[in-house]
Amino acid sequence: MPRESRRVKYKFPQLIIYGMKLRVVLEPSEEGGYTVYVPSLPGCISEGDTREEALENIREAIDLYLEAVEDDLVFNENVEQIEIAV
C-alpha cells in the first residue's frame, strides 16, 4: 500500500503518519511564530509563523527524518527486506 494512501487526518498536538502516532511539542517563540519538535526523534525540529504552518513543517521534517537513505542501506546478499506497518 503506498505511503500517501495510509496517512490519516490528525488532531493537534499529535500526528499520525504511516499508522504511527508521534507526540509533538509546540511552543510559541519569543520573536513570534512557533517552534515545534518531536521528543521521540532527536533533532527533529521545525518552526512556522502560525501554528498550522509549524505543524505542516514538522510533518515534512518527520517524513525526511524517517526516510531511508539508500546509501545507508548496505546489506549482505542473503538479507531479506520486509516492510511492516506499525
Image (cartoon, rainbow, N blue to C red):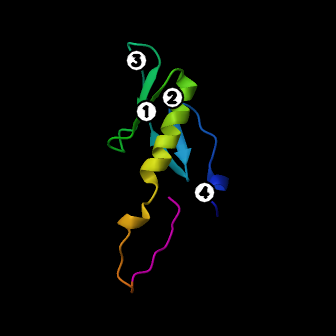
Is the residue 16 above or below the residue 48 in the image?
A: below
Label 4 to label 2, Cα distance in Å?
A: 22 Å
Q: Which residues are magenta?
A: 79-86
Between residue 14 and residue 41, name the one nearer to us: 41
Disc 4 versus disc 3: distance between alpha carbons?
Answer: 32 Å
Q: Which mark is residue 3?
A: 4
72 on left or right of 80: left
Residue found at x 54% / y 48% = 17
User: Mark 3 Cα within 10 Å, few/some/many (few <14, many 20+)?
Assistant: few
Asked if the magenta segment contains residue 82, the reply would be yes
Q: CA distance from mark 1 to mark 2?
A: 7 Å
Q: Which residue is mark 1?
A: 46
Query: In the image, 56: left or right of 43?
Result: right
The label shown at residue 54 is 2
Q: CA distance from mark 3 to mark 1?
A: 12 Å
Mark 1, Cα crowd under 10 Å, few <14 / some 14-19 / many 20+, is many
- Is there CB contact under 8 Å for labels 4 and 3? no
Where residue 3 sits, quadrant-wise, is bottom right
| Residue 76 location, quadrant | bottom left
Q: Callout 3, which amino acid? A: Ser
Tell me, for residue 72, which label it has, or none.
none
Q: CA distance from mark 3 to mark 2?
A: 11 Å
Distance of mark 1 from mark 4, alpha carbons? 22 Å
Q: Residue furthest top?
A: 31
Q: Earlier in the sequence, mark 3 or mark 1?
A: 3
Residue type (three-letter) at the residue carrying disc 4: Arg
Q: Nearer the viewer, residue 13 or 76?
A: 76
**Residue nearest the viewer, comparing 75 with 14:** 75
Q: Main secondary structure of the magenta part?
A: loop
What residue occupies the far front of the structure in this picture?
A: 71
Callouts 1 and 2 close, C-beta under 8 Å: yes
Give the labeled residue for mark 3: 29
